[in-house]
Amino acid sequence: MDKHSEEILSLLRENARLSINDIAAMTKLSAADVGNIIKKLEDNGVIMKYAAIVNPEKDENNRGKVCAEIEIQVTPQREHGFDAIADRIWRFPQVKSLYLMSGGYDLKVIIEGETLKEVAFFVSSKLSTLEGVRSTKTHFILKTYKENDIVYAEAERDRREGVTA
């Protein structure tokens, strides 16, 4: 990737609402050149989507939703490895993120549901029953402080007195 593409990508990562003219002024390129570079980045799949980052604590439609991180141990399929089972898992609408991991488990899934019961049902009836899944471990997300470089809530100071022996 050339330096102009990297510079434009960096600007769009910080603020995807920048206009082509704004980016042109910031990079000292013509608006036509900026437009062509952005189009190329989109066509090549470098830029996949433009989206708003919403604070879930302030989004009334999102309040009360339950998020969980699921650790999954799987048996990889011959000739497909982990990709075949990952392909089945990411298609569930509850799945927000899916990662192949190193360490004690193979896949990490971030899911979202309306209630604790709904998340538990999804894990027990959908994920854990997939062919190749050996085990699951569910961790419920209690609070998000920072995600994707966005700070959602400043950490509150613990005002309790420490206990000393």
Image: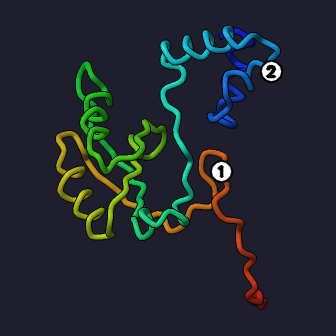
Q: Alpha-carbon neighbours of circle 1 within 10 Å: few (<14), some, or many (≥20)?
A: few
Relative to residue 119, is residue 12 drawn left or right? right
**Mark closer to the chain start, 1 or 2:** 2
Q: Alpha-carbon neighbours of circle 2 within 10 Å: few (<14), some, or many (≥20)?
A: few
Which residue does the numbered mark 1 point to in the structure image? Answer: 150
As shown in the figure, which amino acid type bears the numbered disc 1? Ile
The percent coordinates of residue 113 (x first, y second) are 33, 60
User: Which one is nearer the viewer's eye here, 100 or 55?
Assistant: 55
Q: Looking at the image, is 88 positioned above or below residue 142?
A: above
The residue depicted at 56 percent of the width and 58 percent of the height is 55
Q: Looking at the image, is 101 positioned above or below residue 151?
A: above
The quarter of the rendered structure image containing the C terminus is bottom right
User: Which one is nearer the viewer's eye here, 9 or 35?
Assistant: 35
As shown in the figure, which amino acid type bears the numbered disc 2? Ala
Relative to residue 27, is residue 85 drawn left or right? left
The residue depicted at 73 percent of the width and 88 percent of the height is 160
Relative to residue 54, is residue 123 drawn left or right? left
